[in-house]
Image: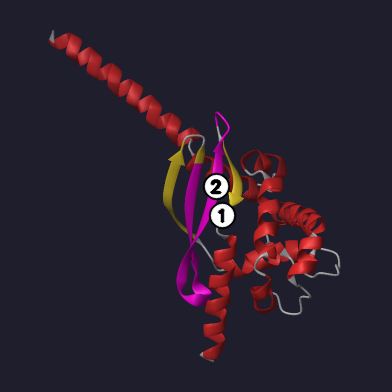
């Protein structure tokens, strides 16, 4: 009887260990690590496996066009008003996709923004992203992972030394079977407004 109990316990531990290992290699956190590795390797094909670039950039354009009031401060010299941004959404989404590709290939948000051609509406999503994730920013922690069926919301905490604070970037991910894929950055608008407030406070303290 004792041997039977021991065998059942070992079997349970084995199954538990396998499930834990599988969660580490197929969970949202692992897929985010793989996306980060793809940027370090400058591998756009691998990056697009873990990040749906069209979905993410389309969502970013939607959120940015609703925040035209803060673009002037974060993107000096820009010619941007809500009507123009909405009319040019397809062009902005296409440009954003190219910026993501340039970022993965170069590893620099600044280089990705600089590589863009002149446009009537000078709004660079890579340039705006560099305001939130500066060159001095570092990954701090996975703040939370909320899985709900085939979707998950993951909070990625980064440092922002320029303002002596941290920020949480929330991404929505979808279960693709043996990996997860980023579909959207859900709080872009809130992050842009927060950075605009921090920048305004910083300038007032000078």
**Mark 1 or 2 closer to N-term?**
2
**Residue 134 visible to the viewer:** no
- Residue at the spot 48% in from the left edge and 43% down from the top edge: 29
Left or right of 87: which side holds 58?
left
Q: Main secondary structure of the magenta part?
A: strand
When asked about the image quadrant of residue 132, the answer is bottom right
**Quarter holding the C terminus?**
bottom right
When asked about the image quadrant of residue 183, the answer is top right
Q: Position of residue 16 (x, y in %)?
A: 33, 26
Q: Is residue 148 above or below residue 10?
A: below
SS category of the residue bearing label 2:
strand
Is the C-beta separation of discs 1 and 2 under 8 Å? yes
Q: CA distance from mark 1 to mark 2?
A: 7 Å
Left or right of 90: which side holds 157?
left
- Give the number of the disc on residue 58: none
> Range of the magenta residues?
152-178
- Give the number of the disc on residue 172: 2
Q: Is residue 53 above or below residue 13?
A: below
- Residue at the spot 55% in from the left edge and 69% down from the top edge: 136
SS category of the residue bearing label 1:
loop
Tell me if mark 2 has few (under 14), some (14-19) or many (20+) residues whose alpha carbon lies within 10 angstroms of its own.
Answer: many
**Quarter holding the N terminus?**
top left
Q: Position of residue 127 (x, y in %)?
A: 69, 67
- Residue at the spot 47% in from the left edge and 53% down from the top edge: 155
């Amino acid at each position: 009887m004792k041997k039977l109990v021991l065998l059942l316990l070992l079997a349970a531990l084995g199954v538990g260990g396998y499930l834990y290992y599988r969660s580490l290699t197929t969970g949202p956190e692992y897929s985010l690590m793989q996306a980060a590795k793809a940027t370090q390797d400058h591998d756009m094909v691998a990056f697009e496996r873990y990040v749906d670039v069209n979905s993410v950039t389309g969502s970013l354009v939607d959120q940015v066009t609703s925040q035209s009031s803060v673009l002037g401060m974060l993107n000096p010299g820009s010619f941007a008003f809500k009507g123009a941004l909405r009319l040019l959404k397809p062009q902005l989404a296409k440009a954003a996709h190219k910026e993501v590709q340039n970022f993965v290939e170069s590893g620099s948000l600044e280089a990705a923004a600089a590589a863009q051609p002149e446009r009537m509406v000078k709004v660079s999503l890579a340039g705006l992203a560099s305001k939130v994730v500066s060159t001095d920013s570092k990954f701090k922690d996975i703040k939370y992972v909320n899985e709900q069926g085939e979707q998950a919301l993951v909070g990625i905490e980064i440092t922002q030394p320029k303002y002596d604070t941290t920020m949480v970037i929330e991404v929505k991910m979808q279960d693709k079977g043996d990996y997860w894929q980023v579909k959207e950055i859900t709080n872009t608008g809130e992050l842009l407004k927060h950075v605009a407030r921090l920048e305004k406070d910083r300038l007032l303290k000078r």
